[in-house]
Image (cartoon, helix red, strand yellow):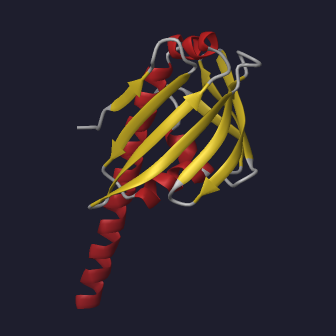
Amino acid sequence: MTNPLTLDIPAGVPWIDFTREFDAPVAAVFNAHRDPDLVRQWLGPRGYEMQIERWDFTSGGGYRYTHRHGDDVYGFRGTFHTVRENDLAVQTFEFEGAPDEVAIEFMRFVDLGDGRCRLEGRSVGRTVEGRDMMVESGMEKGMSEGYERLDELVAEAASGASSDSSTTSSAAQG
């Protein structure tokens, strides 16, 4: 079973808070945000094809990508203002279909111990109306499905790592 996404969308203010726990270490979840080959495998809803034009997950870096679903193409772009390994990412986020509604987003990667972590975030929009438009666009479904895909990706990596170590142990014993 996957961990639930929790959203707090208070009335009358232009922000959204979210939390999501992962049965994976902080380093694995952080790396899945940093590596564009991994990002492509989990970011966004199921059934969408993702093309990454640019992904520089460093302080001062930026990104642009598209999601394609049939004939529909949705573009997104932003700047990574601050990235601290296994700790924090601060970025802007803009859906190109709603120009001028740029959000600033804060994501904290929290180590819960025992190989688990929590992602805590806040997305602050320019206006309450812009924030509400983002919520009504299917944001929750996209985030939930994306984080389910991230769960699958980090679980696959962990099982591959444990098979590699058991193969190494067997080889060392033989």
Compare residues 24 and 118 and report the one nearer the observer: 118
Classify residue 50 by image quadrant: top right
When the figure is inspected, residue 60 is found, relative to residue 160, above or below; the finding is above
In the image, taking residue 9 as reference, residue 24 lies left or right, namely left
Seen at 29% across and 38% down, the residue is 3
Check the picture and name the quadrant holding the C terminus: bottom left
Q: Position of residue 10 (x, y in %)?
A: 45, 18
Q: Position of residue 128 (x, y in %)?
A: 60, 13
Seen at 62% across and 44% down, the residue is 90
In the image, taking residue 47 as reference, residue 99 lies left or right, namely right
Residue 174 seen in the figure = no
When the figure is inspected, residue 63 is found, relative to residue 96, above or below; the finding is below
Compare residues 125 and 116 and report the one nearer the observer: 125
Q: Position of residue 65 (x, y in %)?
A: 69, 34
Q: How many marks?
A: 0
Q: Position of residue 17 (x, y in %)?
A: 46, 30
When the figure is inspected, residue 118 is found, relative to residue 111, above or below; the finding is above
Classify residue 25 by image quadrant: bottom left
Check the picture and name the quadrant holding the N terminus: top left
Residue 26 seen in the figure = yes
Seen at 47% across and 12% down, the residue is 11
Looking at the image, which residue sits at the far front? 12
When the figure is inspected, residue 71 is found, relative to residue 83, above or below; the finding is above
Compare residues 170 and 151 and report the one nearer the observer: 151
